[in-house]
Image (cartoon, helix red, strand yellow):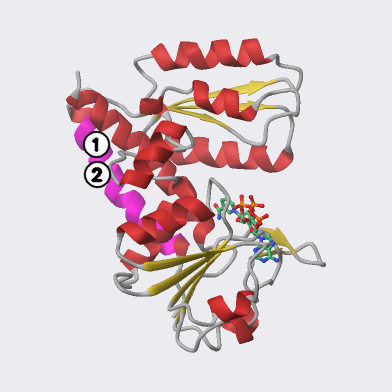
Amino acid sequence: MLISGKEISAAVRAELLERTNKLKEKGRTPGLAVILVGEDPASKVYVNNKEKACFELGFYSEKYLLSENTSEEELLALIDRLNEEDKIHGILVQLPLPSHLNEKKVTERISPVKDVDCFHPVNIGKVLTGEGVFAPCTPAGVMEMLKFSGIDVAGKNAVVIGRSNIVGKPMAMLLLKENATVTICHSKTKDLKEHTSKADILIAAVGRANFVKADMVKEGAVVIDVGINRNEDGKLCGDVDFSEVSGKASYISPVPGGVGPMTITELMKNTLLSAEENLKNF
Ligand code: NDP
């Protein structure tokens, strides 16, 4: 069975639209500010997609396209202003930043209550303790895909390949919260296949084209592909060799059309949640 992030994302967005309209009736419009520094083409596409998603859901949106030479002081001053801005409930700085800007310092300047990417250590800490308002967008998108497909993760062996702060580690935490038995693998893991072939649920977040082959996957496993790569022909592909693994998995997500569309949807959900919380505390 194919797990279509495109379809699930559309269903989730329909629900978000309903909640947004209810919130607007109470006088609150969710507002998202997106900041892009520099000219990275992929980042420009992501920022435009985020703006489009805001428009479709009726959110208020602000987009800041700053020059490559923007100083750290200027960027931090903009974040400070947006932290105080009532119309803005979510602030996102598109990464990667040009090398003269300190990503850690910049992302930590965003107020935790407006940190809709869920990168701030306060929010990551809350993911760990299971009490956060926000969940990191990509892992939350994966959880939504599993839930929507009727896959119960409780008691299952879940293996995550990748331990980055934005995907692998929070992914493991969200699976653990839902009572999976979780293994995290990485580049220093000895005998990766030994681990992956025991996975009832396998999440690939490696960043290597077609890395996961059929002989690494258990018959009937659920396979979610987070990777976004280009193959040798320049075509978009995931971390999983779809043509091989789809014959063995019970459920599999494609690339494109899998986790990718879910990530922006979860960002919208976090922005809406932030606006809902803001109304509660008003
Ligand atoms: P990182 O490069 O930060 O992390 C990759 C992880 O894979 C690391 O933990 C690394 O291990 C591990 N790894 C690398 N090689 C191997 C190997 N041979 N065996 C086992 N583990 C290995 O990437 P991200 O987590 O940021 O992203 C992963 C992928 O997901 C990328 O393709 C990225 O483009 C995509 N992505 C997709 C999103 C979406 O919306 N769909 C959003 C974010 C990312 P180690 O830590 O030891 O180096």
CB at disc 2 and ligand 1 closer than 8 Å: no
* Outermost residue to the right: 232
CA distance for labels 1 and 2? 5 Å
Q: Residue 19 lies in magenta, yes or no?
A: yes
* Residue 167, position as x, y percentages in the image: 53, 52
29 sits to left or right of 190? left
Q: In which quarter of the image is the N terminus?
A: bottom left
* Residue 30, position as x, y percentages in the image: 33, 29
Residue 57, visible in the rendered structure: no
- Disc 1 crowd rating (10 Å Cα; few below 14, some 14-19, many 20+) is some
Amino acid type shown at disc 2: Glu
Confirm or deny contact between disc 1 and disc 2 (CB under 8 A).
Answer: yes
SS state under label 2:
helix
Q: Is residue 223 above or below residue 19?
A: below
- Residue 18, numbered circle: 2
Identify which residue is drawn at 21% across, 24% down: 279
SS state under label 1:
helix
Span shown in magenta: 6-23
User: Where ligand 1 lies, by image quadrant?
Assistant: bottom right
- Residue 21, numbered circle: 1
* Residue 10, position as x, y percentages in the image: 39, 56
Amino acid type shown at disc 1: Asn
Quadrant assignment, res 19: top left
